[in-house]
Image (cartoon, rainbow, N blue to C red):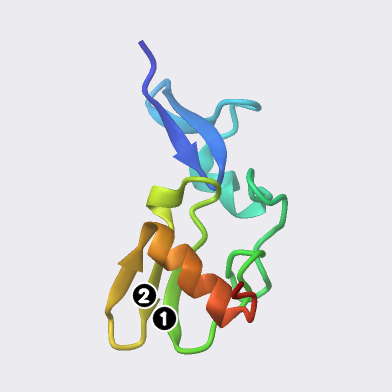
Amino acid sequence: MTATTQLKGHKIEFLNGEWVFSDKKEPTVTTWENRLCGHCGLNNTPEGHDGCLGTLPGVMNACCGHGQTNEAYVQFLDRHCVRGNDALAIMDILKGESH
């Protein structure tokens, strides 16, 4: 049985002693930065932020979760971290997309 998970919205698997993208069998360690998000289809910004997020004000780090709500998070400058649906809601507010 092969171990599998997701990275940046893409299925990955542990094969021959390393993690690879399941579709092309490319090593994740050397190719992850060149992959578009498997969820929204956008590439990282030049600054390295998730393409769908861009730069969020007052935020140290954030991840959209790439389709996995439980992996989404926002870490503020004071190091406080919010995860999951709450993080996604905060991202929408910070991007000016609150409903």
Tell me the distance, in whole angstroms, between the alpha carbons under discs 1 and 2.
Answer: 6 Å
Residue 38 at x, y = what percent? Answer: 64, 43
Q: Is residue 90 left or right of residue 84?
A: right
Q: Using the image as rendered, state which of residue 30 and residue 91 is in the foreground.
A: 91
Left or right of 60: which side holds 31? right
Q: Quadrant of the N terminus?
A: top left
Residue name at image x 65 percent, y 27 percent? 24
Residue drawn at the location 60% of the way across and 45% of the way down: 31
The image's mark for residue 60 is 1
Percent position of residue 56, x then y:
55, 81
Please say if the residues under marks 1 and 2 sit with CB atoms less than 8 Å apart: yes
Regarding mark 2 in the picture, which secondary structure is present there?
A: strand
Provide the residue designation for mark 2: 75
Mark 2 residue type: Gln
Give the residue type that dot 1 points to.
Answer: Met
Secondary element type, mark 1: strand
* Mark linked to residue 25: none
| Sequence-first tag of 1 and 2 | 1
